[in-house]
């Protein structure tokens, strides 16, 4: 059992037991700051414990001990013995197996720098076609993501994956979905919808529906609570409305502005290519959409360089896009992650205080933070 890694399992269990025994009864009496401190402490312990469990489960799997009672797989035995869902036991064993090829990740996991979620994120991209690049870049990736929030780490890993594939000549990965939709009648005359879409077509559909559904949400605020539609109903009504509008439009009418913005970069933002909800795109995702001219490319030298000057009160056109590309998510100091398509471009120094409508004074803020705490970093 020894040698899996360098701290004593019994000490760890004792520590955790002490913490739980000591504080369990006091939870209801905790103040907010005490609860926050305690959470930090408990999650730190959990990270260490997860790492230990992963390593020991790996050793147990390799020892063959699990097969002695005739069990067909280690995952099935672990699930039975520990009262886990099979998916959980499989995940633990897979993680252990992945880590055997990931020394830097293992070190960071064991020392509590990476959570199990981050380990899984790294393991997902360390596949056969990328093993060489992963081995080369692993330490850098670990150091880079260890200090990030999960969503940011996903993005870093997505970009790394994309460039590792280009480097290895695997850029031609086929799109993972062949888009389809089926609308089938049910027995009582209702309809059932199912389908899949590619990253851009799907985003365009979703954006169109969500935009209209949001208008319905705002309109419903004027109605009594009992008559307001829930989110699913609003999306359905939005889809019906979109079809009605499309049928009402002249066949040779001009197509409206594209509904999806692709943020692609140059210079400072070299290699940037993502959807306006922050999802990183592969080059192949753009194939088939290029002719529809939905790609917008922003060029600017650094994040504070002005691309245009404007006496106007609101951020529009190229200036608006420039702020969106520079910020890419809500800039509220809480570290809000809301992506471009759910944010507005506002003035840092308000227009009423003579703040100019220029790039450095632009600020991306989500609807929540813009509405609740406009032009302020202080809670109300
Ligand atoms: Zn926000």
Image: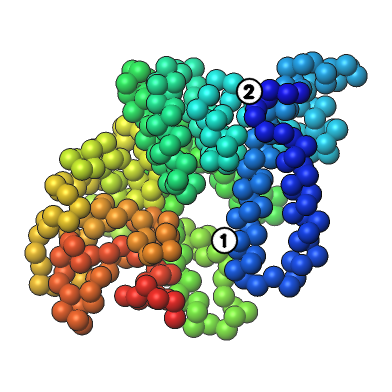
Residue nearest the viewer, comparing 268 with 201: 268
Q: Is residue 252 left or right of residue 40?
A: left
> Few, some or many C-alpha atoms within 10 Å of disc 1 (few <14, some 14-19, many ≥20)?
few
Q: Quadrant of residue 139?
A: top left
Q: Find residue 265 and report its image quarter.
A: top left
Tag count in the figure?
2
Scheme of colours in the image: rainbow
Q: Residue at the spot x=40%, y=76% of the render?
A: 378
**In the drawing, what numbered circle is on residue 232?**
1
Instruction: Evaluate if marks 2 and 1 touch, with contact meaning CB atoms under 8 Å apart.
Output: no
Can residue 257 be seen? no
Q: Earlier in the sequence, mark 2 or mark 1?
A: 2
Question: Which residue occupies 74% across, 54% down?
Answer: 19
Nearer to us: label 2 or label 1: 2
Residue 217 visible in the snapshot:
yes
Residue 48, quarter of picture: top right
Q: Is the CB of the residue bearing disc 2 within 8 angstroms of ligand 1?
A: no
Would you name the residue on which mark 2 appears?
97
Measuring from the top left, give residue 349's x and y in whole percent: 23, 74
For ligand 1, tell me if the residue under mark 1 lies within 8 Å. no
354 vs 142: above or below: below
Choose between 156 and 1: the one closer to the eye: 1
- Residue 188 drawn at (x, y percent): 70, 54
In the rendered view of the protein, which quadrant contains the N terminus?
top right
Helix, strand or loop at mark 2: helix
Residue 108 is labelled as none
Question: What quarter of the picture does the C terminus occupy?
Answer: bottom left
Could you say where residue 7 lies in the image, as x and y percent from the top left? 67, 33
At 74% from the left edge and 48% from the top edge, which residue is drawn? Answer: 16
**236 over 289 or under it: above or below:** below
């Amino acid at each position: 059992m020894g040698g899996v890694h360098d701290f004593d399992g019994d000490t760890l269990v004792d520590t955790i037991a002490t913490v739980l025994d000591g504080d369990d009864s006091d939870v209801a009496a905790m103040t907010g700051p005490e609860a926050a401190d305690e959470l930090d402490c408990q999650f730190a312990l959990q990270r260490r414990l997860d790492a230990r469990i992963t390593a020991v489960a790996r050793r147990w799997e390799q020892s063959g001990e699990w097969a002695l009672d005739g069990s067909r797989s280690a995952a099935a035995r672990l699930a039975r013995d520990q009262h886990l869902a099979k998916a959980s036991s499989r995940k633990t064993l897979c993680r252990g197996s992945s880590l055997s090829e990931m020394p830097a990740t293992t070190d960071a996991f064991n020392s509590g720098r990476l959570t199990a979620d981050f380990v899984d994120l790294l393991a997902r991209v360390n596949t056969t076609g990328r093993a060489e690049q992963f081995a080369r870049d692993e330490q850098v990736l670990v150091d880079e993501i260890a200090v990030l929030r999960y969503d940011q780490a996903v993005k870093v890993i997505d970009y790394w994956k994309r460039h590792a594939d280009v480097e290895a000549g695997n850029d031609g990965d086929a799109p993972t979905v062949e888009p389809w939709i089926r609308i089938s009648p049910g027995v009582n005359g209702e309809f059932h919808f199912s389908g899949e879409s590619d990253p851009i077509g799907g985003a365009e559909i979703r954006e169109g529906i969500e935009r209209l559904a949001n208008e319905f949400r705002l309109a419903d605020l004027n109605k009594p609570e009992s008559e307001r539609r829930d989110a699913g109903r609003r999306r359905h009504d939005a889809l019906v409305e979109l079809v009605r509008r499309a049928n009402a439009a002249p066949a040779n009418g001009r197509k409206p502005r594209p509904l999806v913005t692709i943020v692609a970069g140059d210079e400072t933002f070299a290699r940037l290519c993502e959807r306006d909800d922050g999802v990183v795109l592969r080059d192949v995702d753009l194939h088939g959409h290029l002719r529809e001219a939905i790609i917008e490319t922003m060029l600017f030298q650094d994040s504070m360089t002005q691309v245009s000057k404007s006496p106007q009160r609101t951020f529009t056109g190229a200036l608006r896009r420039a702020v969106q590309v520079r910020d890419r998510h809500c800039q509220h100091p809480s570290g809000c992650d809301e992506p471009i398509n759910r944010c507005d471009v506002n003035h840092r120094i308000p227009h009423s205080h003579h703040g100019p409508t220029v790039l450095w004074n632009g600020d991306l803020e989500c609807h929540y933070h813009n509405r609740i705490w406009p032009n302020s970093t202080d809670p109300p």
